[in-house]
Image (cartoon, rainbow, N blue to C red):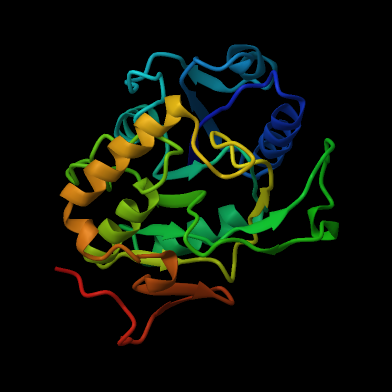
Amino acid sequence: MITIITTFRSFEDPLFSTIQQNAIYSWLQLTPKPEIIVFGNDHPGTNEICKEYNLIHVPDIACTENKTPLGNAVVEEGEKLSKNKIIAWISSDIIVPQKLIEVAQKIYKQLPTFFAGARRHDCKVNELIFGNYEQLKTKPGHPGAGDIFLWSNGFFQDKNMPPFAVGRTIMDSWMIYTAIKHNCCVDITDSCYCIHQTHDPNPRNKTGAWNQRDYKDYEENQRLWKESEAYKNPNVEIKYANYIFSQNVLKRKRKSSNKPKIL
């Protein structure tokens, strides 16, 4: 029913290894079991982890000169390779609940062409955890942070996504804007409690500054963003969605003066 697409960071760092394995474990507990496709091979441990957890690994993917995967390439290849009707882009530090599957299925039945996202909840995790996620102490994450999206397979085929570097900001805002423009964006925050395991703002350092290598990718993302139609509405977040899915009901949101004008 669902294909999860993602990219990994290095598993050499003990904390990132723990965080990413916690995320993978939660994905593998979903029923029906999702297809999971991992793109890229620049970070140590990716190939080994994919073999250990029996994940589909696509090592060759278009990247920046700094070997950061390009989001448009990941989306395009993910849609082509997927055997399912729904794609889920989930960051490798996100724990998802079983309800993700239920929500996706119900939205798809009512809105066959859709794009959905959820605001994350932050939690500090330092060890491997296997279930009992409801016991974790969390707090609402940044409203502009996009770490989990679902959409109808094929939605982005003709949308001309710019070649944003993955994990260097902005790409999520472009995706949300595009979905709102096509009147199919759904906010599933109330129905899908997704947990973001916090960590130092890598690839930035502890002061929040980008390192020189990754700053080039960040700058290029900013350039692409400013050249896009979406830049005219830079504050687009999932709260501006056309629909909200809450209490198992898909509802069209009332028009608000706070909603950005789609040009």
Q: Residue 206, located in which quarter of the rendered image? A: top right
Give x and y (percent) for residue 237: 40, 65
Indicate the quadrant where residue 183 lies. bottom left
In the image as oriented, which residue stretches furthest toward the left? Answer: 263
Residue, x 58% and y 71% (percent of image)?
190
In this view of the protein, can residue 167 be seen by the observer? yes
Q: Is residue 167 above or below residue 142?
A: above
Q: Residue at x 26, y 34 (%)?
A: 163
Q: Residue at x 36, y 32 (%)?
A: 217
Residue 83 in picture, x, y percent from top left: 41, 32
User: From the viewer's perspective, is residue 78 above or below residue 144?
Assistant: above
Q: Nearer the viewer, residue 163 or 90?
A: 163
Q: Is residue 212 shown above or below 221? A: above
Q: Seen in the image, is 128 located left or right of residue 8? A: right
Q: Is residue 78 visible?
A: no
Counting from the top left corner in percent of width and height, residue 221 is at 31, 40
In the image, is 198 to the left or to the right of 156? Answer: right
Tell me where residue 53 sits by quadrant. top right
Quadrant position of the C terminus in the picture: bottom left
Q: Residue at x 65, y 12 (%)?
A: 48
Q: How many marks?
A: 0
Viewer-side residue, 198 vs 209: 209
Name the spot of residue 94 as percent of width and height, x first.
63, 45
